[in-house]
Amino acid sequence: MKLIDLENHYYDPATVEAMAARDGYPFFDRDGRAICWNEKIRMPFDALHDLLLDFDRRIESMDRNGIATAVISPSQGLEELDPSESVPLTRKNNDTTYALTQKYRGRCLGSAALPVKDVAASCKELQRCVDELGFVCWHTHSNYSGESIEQEKFIPIFETAAELGVYIYLHPTLPPYSDLFEYGFTFAGPAAGFTVDTYLATMKLIVSGVFDRVPDTRLVLGHLGEAIPFLLDRIDNRLNFLPNDRIKNRKKPSEYFRDNIMVTTSGNMSPAAFRCTKDVLGIESITFGSDYPYENIDEMTDYVKMLDLAEDERELLFRGNAERLMGGR
Ligand code: GRE
Ligand code: ZN
């Protein structure tokens, strides 16, 4: 049975060029082969660099693992720049994504990168990406250089996604907690900071009432839900403890996970974590994501193939849920 991969990352060479030419953070240090996010955080980019740019090897890795189709998304760095940079760069990036979806027809689907600091331009660009380029989602990150994504000013982008009928993939990025930077990229990023920031971004979307205001929002989280399934019962319970009028959600957090939110397997290869996620959210809410090239895609696919599932459950996890989410796009 073929898989659909909802989390497969790349960089547009034009983005790498533009990041190499920047004076301020974030920038790409060509000599040191690293992305420098701030004074304390350098992300070594050596082996990854080629994998992020190389589509022949990506398609080969999909063939080898039975992945029919991957939704490709640009990695961090673009959306949070000032509009003078992010508006032309995200547009350029989306055009590159489109060209890749045409070159690898049926194998790659597009996700939109948006210049979020110009909300009107973002809504227009999302519309172009969906209506003209056939993209399936908005790929966003858990904060915009420290700005919280549930803020009132960003709501029009959520509304546009809902109106266009596309989902929002909420991907981690470095959190704005500078105390974590003392420990370098791996800890501030994927080993701890990414999870915490995406967990909080999701919970802030819930408690600020974004899902009540834009009830057709469909949100997808990676990494088996960024630890939320493990804690969801406690979250429901504790939000009822001394409620205040700044907590605006009308339903329990678990109900938004039933109605609005799905998770992918990206970068979490623990069978125990999978069982917990399936017990709490149900198999209808989990779909395959590889996190290529940050994760070993062979190990990621071997892992989902060896999970103890009935045939109909396997079908939902491998592709059925993703197809339903994309609604025939
Ligand atoms: C990821 O997508 O999981 C990721 C990044 C950047 C660095 C490491 C990493 O986007 O795991
Ligand atoms: Zn990822």
Image (spheres, helix red, strand yellow):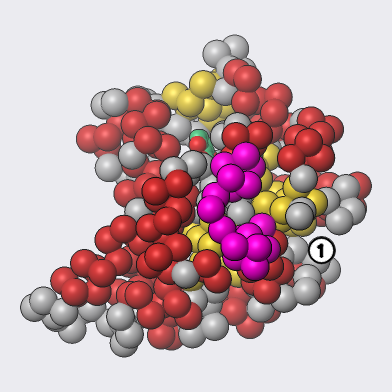
- Is 105 positioned to the left or the right of 189 in the image? right
Q: Residue at x 62, y 39 (%)?
A: 302
Q: Is residue 112 visible?
A: no
Which contiguous range is marked in magenta?
A: 301-318
Decide: is 165 above or below 179.
below
Q: Which residue is mark 1?
A: 133
Decide: is 86 above or below 125.
above
Q: Main secondary structure of the magenta part?
A: helix
Q: Which image quadrant: the N terminus? A: bottom right
- Is 52 positioned to the left or the right of 275 in the image? right
Where's residue 9, x and y in %?
64, 42
Q: Residue at x 42, y 73 (%)?
A: 257
- Is 111 positioned to the left or the right of 235 in the image? right
For the residue marked with disc 1, what is the amino acid?
A: Leu
Q: Quadrant of residue 130?
A: bottom right
Q: Which image quadrant: the C terminus? A: bottom right
Q: Residue at x 58, y 45 (%)?
A: 306
| Along the line of sight, the residue nearer the viewer: 37 or 217 | 217
Q: Quadrant of residue 34?
A: top right
- Assign a secondary structure to mark 1: loop
Q: Is residue 306 magenta?
A: yes
Where's residue 62, x and y in %?
76, 41
